[in-house]
Amino acid sequence: MQVVGFGGYALLVILLAGQAFYWHETRRFFYLGGRKLSLTISVSTFVATWMSAASLIGYTAWLYSDGYQAFTASVNGWLLGLVFLPFTVSKLRKSRALSLPEWLEENFEDSRLRKVSALALLVAYSLYIVIQFRVFGSIVSNMLGTPPIISSILIYLFVIYTTFGGLASVAKSDALNLAIIVLGITVGAIFVIKQVGSPMKIHGIIAENHPHLLETLDKRGAIFTFSMMLGWGFGVASNPQYAIRIMSAHRPKSAFSMLWISALIIGWIYACTTLIGLGGKVLSSSAASDQAGSLYHLISTALPPQIYTLLMIAILAAAVSTANSQLLLATCSFCYDLFPSWSAHEEGDIIREDRFLLINRIGIGIIATFCLILSQLPLPGILDLGQYSWAVVSICFLLPMYLPGKKKKEGLFIAISAALVLHTILVYVFQIRPEQALLPSLLVEGTLWSLLSRRSRT
Amino acid sequence: MRIKNPSLEFLIKTIVSLLAIIITLGITSTALYVEYKDRLNAEMKQLKEVSSLVRYLSTSEATLLVNKVGKNWVFTNTQNPDGEFLTLRTADGFQWNVTLDRKKIFSEMLLNRRLVIVMGMIGLLLALEIAILLAYSLTRPLKAIAWTCQQVSSGKWTHIPGNPSKFKEIQILKETFNSMVDQLKKLHERERQVARAERLAALGQLVAGVSHEIRNPLAAMRVHLDLLSETVSEEGKPSLMVLDQEIDRLNSTVSQLLNFARPKALVKGPVSLRELFGWTFNMVKMQLSKKNIQWRHELPQKDIYVWGDRDKLQQMLLNLVLNAIKAMEETGGTLEIKAIEETDFALLSIKDHGPGIPEELIDRIFDPFFTTRPDGTGLGLPLVLQIVQMHEGSIEVDPGPGAEFKIQLPLYREGGRN
């Protein structure tokens, strides 16, 4: 069943979501789909990119093991970040920049900002792609009993296949992936409800058998839970994946519509995953030790093979849709932002533009291969990697994107660099969790920026 | 015109992708089918062997045996079941109708061969990536060729850019196309030269006929104007001055025509570019200050001498400088004039900061009588070209914005010309 399901998904991606090299392609088309993405495609690519394997597996497994506090700390934070995003629409749409690092340079007139933020993005997204490769490898190995390296090579090829054509082909594959994610998660949730009775009954059984799962706060306290929530929220609010989708929408109005329609679909998916996680606890209460294994155990023991396969394929779709989007952004950071001289020619110079896009495609291959190798090495758990990369992104973009008032150009580069160094020290020397180290780092960044800009004015 | 045909890239990709899918599916499913058939045969053989064995066994012994080896069998006690059932009868008369559980055999076979299927998928994806890259590398040179064709059709003699192609056919096409562009460019230039020569010949005849008729009356008019100037009242003198200026202008135009149509032989000698620049500046300095134009000239410390006709070269440089002033008369700016010494030639450059020459006019600016100014004669630049050619030099134009004329003239060396 799993073999057939997986083969079917592979064929669907190949036939329906194949990428294309467009005859009149330019970097604007490659990175932003020519800023002409329709509302439907924008919504599809926004939600499919949002739903990563980390958010589906990590959240469901966390919910399964720790109950409602997973919702408080993660989903709350993610949705909080979504509330911030409409405030960036007019700022981002006014700019002609093709990437968020370029937007920083354009707005704050400092080319160093572009370089440092591009480097941070490259590192953060490479780590995140590693997560997707690992999750995919782990799931396919569980499904098919193949060695994890073989499964990881499969996602590597899927991701390259859907990224070579730029944002337009990523968005096309995202439409298919979103349909599979929504279908798989919905069917899974319906089955769980049917088995247990109703959502209220799930709550009731959990209250009776596992009362500790009803705790909404982490046992380390409200501040811990709240800081974790803010960490995730700030990560979402300043995530270039979403900024790029706002920039690539056809009109400002469709960018706003994309955000609210996506919020509804995302809300639906989280409601379903919450039901699967808690309902799974009711149906099967023993779990494996690691996150991916825990979810695999949950759905393989609690669900019938057809629904289990569908759900697994939904998670694969989530992994592919997030990885290809991040791979494109990592490539953009590398080829466009870190080495702007490679694209110093006019967009209309089609020969040099073609060569530049070829360099991007080679970059996609190199970064994906690097991530594939990393995914086979022993690294921290899925959520840890995710939190580190999101925190790095927040440090680079959150304050410049959202700080109200007159733009202060001076001191931002030093403030961001200092915050990145501080965050790394807090995480690796003082062993503080990345999302918790984010808040003091942001505080230092804001204070430094404010002080340095004042000093330069006096 | 919008072309709606499918692209070659799409076709190559689709055909190769479909082939890859068909081949992968074909090979994988054939391999799986063969194995499935083998398993069915093996199971059937075992079933027949068991069938011949159980007739000597008691029911309890037969049940033990069947349970052990018949995991992929379906049993029924129905008398005449539908399908291919084999009857197992024990020594004590008990009987089962048995057939193979094909679905289970197939599922087990798929499970055992899952690695083959996954490797098939990897092979398929790799084949697709290769199809995409193949289509890409085959069609991208065509994009460069199409772009160059567009450039040539809009009058720009461009070669196909990029490095030599790895593919022989594309490289031949590139070389042939570039050679064709060169030939066309030469042909075009030759046509222009012929047209110019025809115009010059016609002009020569016209000038020969008309200049005499114009010059003589003009000379008479000048004499009578001088006589009149002694007798005319103060009120009439401004009108006489206008007449005087207009006669000068007519004389100048006729002289230009004559110079152009029947150029005098060159009187060559060493000409100092420093002196040439100084003379030109003196001629135009009033106009420069009136039109708020700055003059900037650059010369190496050691003066450069060219081998040529001083008068002609003065005329050439003056014409170019006057053109530059005209180009900047509305905007002002800096007129840059410089000279450097190269191996065999002196390179002069005259650059203005005006709007530049429209690309569509660049081929016509040296044509006699071609002008965009209502008060122009259309003889200034043709005369410049003629003087440069008479000196065996060359002229290039960068249309700008901020047009720049670059002229190569032969250097004068000690002991004679270069």
Image (cartoon, rainbow, N blue to C red):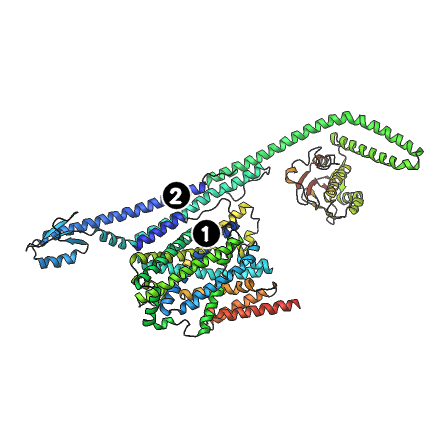
In the picture as drawn, the residue positioned furthest to the left comes out as B92
Q: Position of residue A423 (x, y in %)?
A: 50, 69
Viewer-proximal residue, A190 or A41?
A190
Q: Position of residue A268 (x, y in %)?
A: 41, 59
Residue B310, quarter of picture: top right
Which quadrant would residue B22 be assigned to in this image? top left
Count the numbered circles shown: 2
Q: Are marks 1 and 2 in contact (CB under 8 Å)?
A: no
Chain name for mark 1: A
Rendering coords of residue A257 (x, y %): 49, 55
Q: Could you tell me which residue is drawn at 90 percent across and 32 percent down?
A: B226
Q: Position of residue B213 (x, y in %)?
A: 80, 25
Local crowd size for mark 2, using a 10 Å CA cut-off: few (<14), some (14–19), many (≥20): some
Question: Mark 1 highlights which residue?
Answer: A40
Can you say which quadrant of the picture contains the C terminus of chain B?
Answer: top right
Relative to residue A100, is residue B265 drawn left or right? right
Q: Nearer the viewer, mark 1 or mark 2?
A: 1
Q: Which mark is residue A168?
A: none
Q: Secondary structure at mark 2?
A: helix
Task: Give the residue type that dot 2 points to.
Answer: Val
The local crowd at label 1, few if under 14, some if 14 to 19, many if 20 or more residues have their Cα within 10 Å, is some
Residue A242 shows in this picture: yes
Q: CA distance from mark 1 to mark 2?
A: 31 Å
Q: Work out whether B268 lies above or below A213.
A: above
What chain does badge 2 belong to?
B
Discs 1 and 2 lie in a common subunit: no
Q: Secondary structure at mark 1?
A: helix
Q: Foreground: A387 or A198?
A: A198
Amino acid type of the residue that numbered disc 1 sits on in the rendered structure: Thr
Where A69 falls versus B152 (above or below)? below
Quickly name the residue at label 2: B16
Does residue A151 appear anywhere in the picture?
Answer: no
